[in-house]
Image: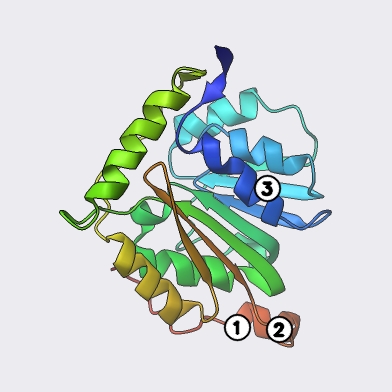
Amino acid sequence: MSTERWNHNIHYHRLLLAAVPAGGRVLDVGCGEGMLTREVAARAAHVLGVDLDRPSIELARATTAQANVEYRCADVLVDAFDGQVFDAVVSVATLHHLGTRAGLQRMAALLRPGGVLGVVGLASSRLPQDLPWEIAAAIGTRLLKLRHTYWEHAAPKVWNSPDDYGSVRRIASECLPGASFRRLLLWRYILLWQKPQGLGVAGALAWRGPWRGGGE
């Protein structure tokens, strides 16, 4: 059995890492203790990890040696980030904390033109139509736990997402035209989107899409 950290979120880090452009500036939203942040730093020029939980940020700082990583205790919905825009924004199991609509539009606003947004998120299942997914996820988890030791992070959690998978897909299509949405086996989905080119830096800073704050 592997002794490396593993859980449902970590299992899908690789999908986000594959989407991050090499050599860019990346924002990790809801970074927690910084595991994904450190992984992204291996291919990015600079990574900023943000989280509202101060103990998690302090632990991330204490366990990170890379010079190209920075952490900030901040609310991504309101922090101006010194006017920065990013080449990529990634987030794992955080969007439902922010509100799906508000979170997607805010993260999109922080991207430069051509930048990539990657989200691995949680959504609520609807029964009975989602029962096959629930059974498959339970079996998949049981099999994976035969090879991995499950690790539980200490950061605060919100278990029940207010949106089901269909609602997340709909909101994403409204906020981020052309976004790719795929449901994953282990009670997760992945959302990938590239911001349209041609806005320029000033346009990127001004772009908010239909965002007006609040959540759904």
Which is nearer the N-term, disc 3 or disc 2?
3
3 and 2 marks in contact (CB < 8 Å):
no
Residue 215 visible in this rendered orientation of the protein:
no
Q: Secondary structure at mark 1?
A: helix
Q: So how many labels did they put on this image? A: 3
Which amino acid is tagged 1?
Ala
The one nearer the camera, 78 or 178, is 178
Circle 3 or circle 2, nearest the eye: 3
Task: Where is residue 64? Give x, y as percent.
Answer: 69, 28
Residue at which label 1 appears = 206
1 and 3 marks in contact (CB < 8 Å):
no
- Crowdedness of circle 2 by 10 Å Cα count: few (<14), some, many (20+)? few
Task: Where is residue 199? Give x, y as percent.
Answer: 70, 87
Say how the picture is coloured.
Answer: rainbow
Q: Residue at x 60, y 83 (%)?
A: 206
Q: Quadrant of the C terminus?
A: bottom left
| Marks 3/2: CA–CA distance | 28 Å
Q: Secondary structure at mark 3?
A: helix
Residue at which label 2 appears = 202
Which amino acid is tagged 2?
Ala
Taking 178 as reference, is 107 above or below it? above
| Marks 1/2: CA–CA distance | 6 Å
1 and 2 marks in contact (CB < 8 Å):
yes
Residue at which label 3 appears = 17
Q: Residue at x 68, y 47 (%)?
A: 17
Which amino acid is tagged 3?
Leu
The one nearer the camera, 196 or 192, is 192
